[in-house]
Amino acid sequence: MSSTWLKSAIFYEIYPNSFSDMNGDGYGDFAGITEKLDYIKSLGVNALWLNPHYDSPFMDGGYDVRDYFAVSPRFGSEADFDELIAAAHARGIKVILDLVPGHTSEQNADFLKSAEAVRNELSDRFIWTNGEWEFPQGFRAISGRHDRKGNYIVNFFSTQPALNYGFNRIDEPSWQMPYTSDAAMATREWLKSVMRFWLDRGADGFRVDMAGSLVKNDGADNEKPATSEIWRDIRAMLDKEYPDTVLVSEWSDPQAIRAGFDADFMLDHHGNPYNLLVRAEEREGCYSYFDIAGRGDGKAFADGFSAWYGEVKAAGGYIGLLSCNHDTPRLAPQYTAEQLKLVYATLFTLPGVPFLYYGDEIGMRYIKDLPSVECGFARTGSRTPMQWSVERNAGFSTAEQTFLPTFADKQTNVAAQTKDKKSLLNFIRSLFEFRKTRKEFAGGDFEFLYADGSKPLVYRRGELIIVVNPTKSKCTVPVTVPPKFKPIFSAGKEAKAQKTSIAVQPLSFTVFGGK
Ligand code: GLC
């Protein structure tokens, strides 16, 4: 855990297809992102996470990498990519890339080599059974697509063959290799070579896709001893060769930090703290704390979050806190813009690294029932093009047709919200600005001071006392604010400190501070 910049990082996630199209082909591109860097900087973010930028047949939005050492021509040239990195760095913006370590595209050259009928040096780069009629329990195996005698295991969709990092528990010794076998070690070295390649090109780190998926039969998410061993080995390589590299995992368990990651996303999993805070609505009988009708449970959230945070902190890492991502429904229209201010203010003042998903700063909506494109399925509705203005294609592209439809309305676009002082966009800017002025957000201790059902939640970051009320009821909570403290940041009407309590206004967020 050597990177120094992560503690004050604020990330912006960009799905390259959907951000800005400069060449008019209906897909976003590198040049489009470069052109918008001043806008990105104006948000107050200082780091980017780019979803996969690699050459890909896009059978899973680019998470099916055909060539790990080339950019997708859809997004521009190699030079356009280098220019984007350089232009971001020139503005003090770090860039992390998506690393897909567990599986390739079925069109990947190494996979095709491993699928050849005659044994060769890459035969064991992927996981194959011995016989064409062998369908192992607990794995998804694809048959009859290649001349090799055997079936191959896939990690996600059927187009994504699993790379061979070996097995921890071996049930079928005839084809399951130990994770320390030469073949598994060779895959690990190949992965290091991919990382070195992009770090040499200027990347500042990686968001690691399905980071816990490498070694098979490796136990539950909070265990994964063999997979963890691999990541610790990779971390050691980075510490030696690229010491300031940041690794953020898609793992969603504190074990990721013990495995050497700097930060780990808390994803939307049923019943986990993130789910209980903002995303529980869709599940039957379970409501988020931000439920306006007050059916949520702040205590359940606070208890779960404290335990998770405690483990992550003890291991020396951070929780990645997301407004949304490319796999998750956007929070609008479930929440109104006024509610979103409270949600973002809370998420991004809790201890962790903020990740703002493109378009969330203007409250872009999740589009329900949008026909799937490039195997996005339900996720397609969170991947629609950025809404810059009410001009043609929401200002995203001049093409006749864009790869997904655009949905700008009068208010939900950057141009309109830039002019509106009270917009969500300008609120996000002031929130990130505020974060920068207070050292408490780059460390400092943290605890919940009050949590009880849907009543206002109160927590402390260093000396700051933060209170949020997600419902329409006024409420007084028994927390004492030091006498000289004043509201120094708020959304909605400010809360008022009384002698031994805080009077909290409906739908409001307030930070109390001394100096
Ligand atoms: C991760 C990605 C998702 C992708 C999957 C397979 O969950 O976020 O978009 O489909 O991994 O790579």
Image (cartoon, grey):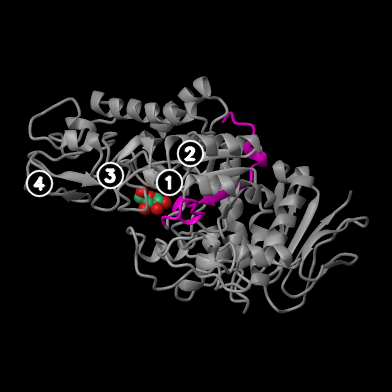
Q: Residues within 10 Å of mark 2 (few under 14, many from 20)?
A: some
* Residue range (magenta): 1-25
Which disc, if any, is residue 105? 3
Per the rendering, the mark at residue 80 is: 2
Q: Secondary structure at mark 4?
A: loop
Q: Is residue 194 above or below residue 240?
A: below
Could you tell me the amino acid type at mark 1? Phe
Sooner in the amino-acid sequence: mark 3 or mark 2: 2
Residue 297 occupies quadrant: bottom right
Indicate which disc residue 335 carries: none
The residue type indicated by label 4 comes to Glu
Say if residue 341 shows up in the picture: no
Residue at the spot 39% in from the left edge and 46% down from the top edge? 210
Left or right of residue 312, residue 71 in this image: left
The picture places residue 438, in percent across and down from the top left corner, at 78, 46
Q: Nearer the viewer, mark 3 or mark 1?
A: 1
* Residue 6 belongs to the span the image colors magenta: yes
Taking depth in this image into account, of 453 and 48 the one nearest to the observer is 48
Q: Mark 4 highlights which residue?
A: 134
State how far apart marks 3 and 2 are (Cα): 24 Å
* Element under disc 2: helix
Q: Disc 3 versus disc 1: distance between alpha carbons? A: 18 Å
User: What residue is pinned by disc 1?
Assistant: 75
Residue type at numbered disc 2: Asp
Q: Quadrant of residue 428?
A: bottom right
Q: Are marks 2 and 1 in contact (CB under 8 Å)?
A: yes
Q: Secondary structure at mark 3?
A: loop
* Precedes in sequence: disc 2 or disc 4: 2
Tell whether label 4 touches label 1 (CB within 8 Å). no
For the residue carrying disc 4, how many other residues have a C-alpha within 10 Å: few (<14), some (14-19), or many (20+)? Answer: some
Residue 462: image location, x then y, percent: 77, 46
Where is residue 293 shown, x and y percent of the image? 62, 79
